[in-house]
Image (tube, helix red, strand yellow):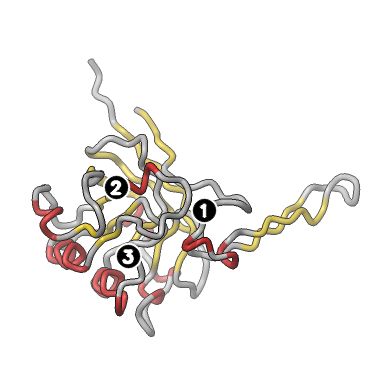
Amino acid sequence: MKIYDISMEIHEEMTVYKNYEHKKPQIKMVSNFDTGTSYETDVTLNLHTGTHIDMPLHMIQGGSTLDTFDITKMITPCKVLDLTHVSGGITKKDLEKYEIKEDDFILLKTKNSDVEEFDFEFIYLEKTGASYLVEKRIKGVGIDALGIERAQPEYETHRQLLSQGVVILEGLRLKDIQEGDYFLYAVPLKIRGVEASPVRALLMEERKLQ
């Protein structure tokens, strides 16, 4: 069995959405062995920074929050699709060639995985692609970008997915991951009343005995 860590590392100079300063983590040592009896650190972190999941409240007024979320959706078989040939938005046509079934959790590997800095022209899931995944009744979708869409009008991709209970997982690191079937662990923090959470996302690759 091989385990891949597909999460972003959290630090003060990490890549954040649109390079917004307010999204950069603040990590502050508040006690050390010179000033106290222990070492302690405070972290201030926007919940959409790094690898994270979105809840319906993020884009839907009155939508459900993290404390109502079934975390078993994030401990699940998944499929990594290689879409590194796509430029711009991932459409229904791009996805139709793949065998996507009800309750699948789909991870979209794109050219984003080759770029560490924030790319304002990042590959995203276009609204027809989102509609197609909703029609397929998938469980969740992840992407190797800090947003699943590039602030499209009315945030149609987010709203189509979240309104139908499809989990959105953003900020993945899939550069070293081959297309195929895996097992995903991406459990959120246990925070009441919020619209998102950081996750530590891991993929497990089952290897058959020779």
The amino acid pointed to by label 2 is Thr
Q: In this orientation, which residue lies closer to the viewer: 198 or 179?
A: 179
The tag on residue 71 is none
Q: Residues within 10 Å of mark 3 (few under 14, many from 20)?
A: many
The amino acid pointed to by label 1 is Thr
Name the element at disc 3. Answer: loop
Name the element at disc 2. Answer: loop
The tag on residue 110 is 2
Name the element at disc 1. Answer: loop
Residue 2, position as x, y percentages in the image: 37, 29
Which circle's residue, 1 or 3, is located before the other in the chain? Answer: 1
Tell me the CA gap for discs 1 and 2: 17 Å
The amino acid pointed to by label 3 is Glu
User: Which residue does the numbered mark 3 point to in the structure image?
Assistant: 149
**Viewer can see residue 143:** yes
Q: Residues within 10 Å of mark 1 (few under 14, many from 20)?
A: many
Residue shown at 26% from the left, 74% from the top: 156
Residue 55, position as x, y percentages in the image: 38, 69
User: Which residue does the numbered mark 1 point to in the structure image?
Assistant: 15
Which circle's residue, 1 or 2, is located before the other in the chain? Answer: 1
Residue shown at 14% from the left, 63% from the top: 132
Task: Tell me which corner region of the image, top left, top right, bottom left or bottom right, holds residue 183.
Answer: top left
Task: Tell me which corner region of the image, top left, top right, bottom left or bottom right, holds residue 54.
Answer: bottom left
Q: Is residue 138 above or below residue 79?
A: below
Q: In this orientation, which residue lies closer to the viewer: 140 or 192?
A: 140
